[in-house]
Image (cartoon, rainbow, N blue to C red):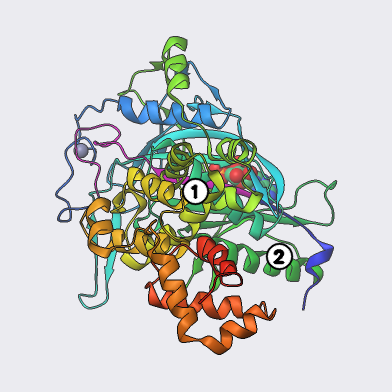
Amino acid sequence: MNSNLNWNIVIGLEVHVQLNTNTKLFCGCKNESLGNPNSRCCPICIGLPGALPAPNLSAIKKSILFGIAANSKINSKIQFARKNYFYPDLPKGYQTSQHYFPICENGEIQFFFNKKPKSVRLTRAHLEEDAGKLIHSVKNQATHIDLNRCGSPLLEIVSEPDLRSAEEARAYLAQLKQLIQYLGISNCDMEKGQLRCDANVSIRKNENEKLGTRTEIKNVNSFKFVEKAIKHEVNRQIEILESGREVHQCTLQYDDKSDSISILRIKEDAQDYRYFPCPDLPLVSIESKKIDKIKFSCPETPINKRLRFQKEYQLSFIDSERICQSLDIANYFENLSNRIFNPKEAKNLLLGAIAKILKDKKISINDLPISIEEFSELYQLKSEDKISNLNYKKLIRILADSNHSLTKILEDNNLIIEKDDSIMDDILEVANEHPKELERFRNGEEKLKGFFMGQIMRKTQIKANPKEIIKLIENLKILSD
Ligand code: ADP
Ligand code: MG
Ligand code: ZN
């Protein structure tokens, strides 16, 4: 057993996000992982001699948008550089990336961890191209190469070593993913590898000491695995240091099947990638007018939305978190609240009845078969006591399951409370059927109200409005038989 509490854990993350542009970063090939292997590539993305790349403006704009949302400095000049190395999934022999002039420098990501605000500084965010995929086939005893992913645009977001636990690293990643989804620049589908993370880990005795030697866990593609992998690595380093040995800089990989980490390679020195500006690509100037235009179009960030919802709609900390989880849900909440003038009811609906429908039907909020207008009409009926609370909930479910309009459903199901005197007639009838109970009620046994209530609801098949019935039951005390 090692003593985790005696150590200060330091983590910095490098996150690769696949931008959702139509085409790849330097050519016109479709930016999609679909299609037969090697069907979405051209001389440019596989780097045949003489092919000339051209930067994808949409990828640059999306990166700038990220930088603005993360409070980064946007460089007025960006330069692409070649990072030279050999690997079978990289036919060009170099990766076109950014080194000296990245698009975004500095910045910060704010989030809540254990309900407390936390800010992680960003070092930089830059554009680079993805590599292909190696597919190892045991059956064929061969490794296949699929180059469809070659040249897909990645935004690499590098954090400062500001994270202090595996759980905190996970919360940071969740916030980053949410921000990127709000910005609409990537779907961040981790199962499809659209968000991948390298975790750099070191430990030291306390916060004021200089940083310890770090190791790097490569390419982890789930939040849960990042958290687990970091915990393993922290334990490994603690064991090494506590037994008087030294941590060596190395690259590790995490295997989710065995839930363990293993060393891939020892880094003697920093690898020499022999970066140099790509002679085929121009220096891209970004005018401040263009940046202002993107700034203007930048949507509200998740954290700002949460804070605004807490203030404007009196949502609790937790409810604001749940409602702002996705932009679609947050937008729906806001539309509904503004329509029915009751944020509390909108929240209850969304986190209750609507959440259940979405879960049961396995659909997203945009496919909800009930319109905001119908909700508002229903709510109106309930507020005016024209339908009971029970029928309100019932109707939502019926609406979700049928493709009829609310008006038709109300007609067919006869759920509107009748305002005529027939309810009083029903009440009298019930009273007549239960003379003993009536007697006891008249003699002061108040609890019999509940009994009559139940009988009346059964008789009227819950069409009646409970509030009204309670009032009417009182009359039984004075009315003659
Ligand atoms: P490289 O590109 O070789 O991986 P960088 O200097 O760009 O190296 O650092 C990458 C990441 O490592 C950054 O996220 C940074 O915060 C993190 N990092 C640097 N030093 C440490 C350390 N001592 N402990 C933990 N993380 C670190
Ligand atoms: Mg690295
Ligand atoms: Zn191509």
Q: Please state if 473 lies on the left or on the right of 22 as rendered.
A: right
Q: Which residue is mark 1?
A: 346
> Magenta stretch?
12-32
Q: Please state if 10 lies on the left or on the right of 284 as rendered.
A: right
Q: Nearer the viewer, residue 159 or 417?
A: 417
Q: Residue furthest front?
A: 480
Q: Please, what secondary structure does the residue beneath circle 2 have?
A: helix
Give percent across and percent down for residue 108.
62, 35
Q: Please, what secondary structure does the residue beneath circle 1 have?
A: helix
Q: Is mark 2 within 8 Å of ligand 1?
A: no
Mark earlier in primary sequence (2, 1): 2
Residue lying at 45% horizontally and 79% vertically, measured from the top left: 430
For the residue marked with disc 2, what is the amino acid?
Gln
Give percent across and percent down for residue 272.
51, 41
For the residue marked with disc 1, what is the amino acid?
Ala
Res 258 visible: no
Q: Which residue is mark 2?
A: 237
Q: CA distance from mark 2 to mark 1?
A: 49 Å
Q: Please state if 151 lies on the left or on the right of 102 as rendered.
A: left
Q: Please state if 292 lies on the left or on the right of 318 as rendered.
A: left
Q: Is residue 26 magenta?
A: yes
Give percent across and percent down for residue 134.
29, 60
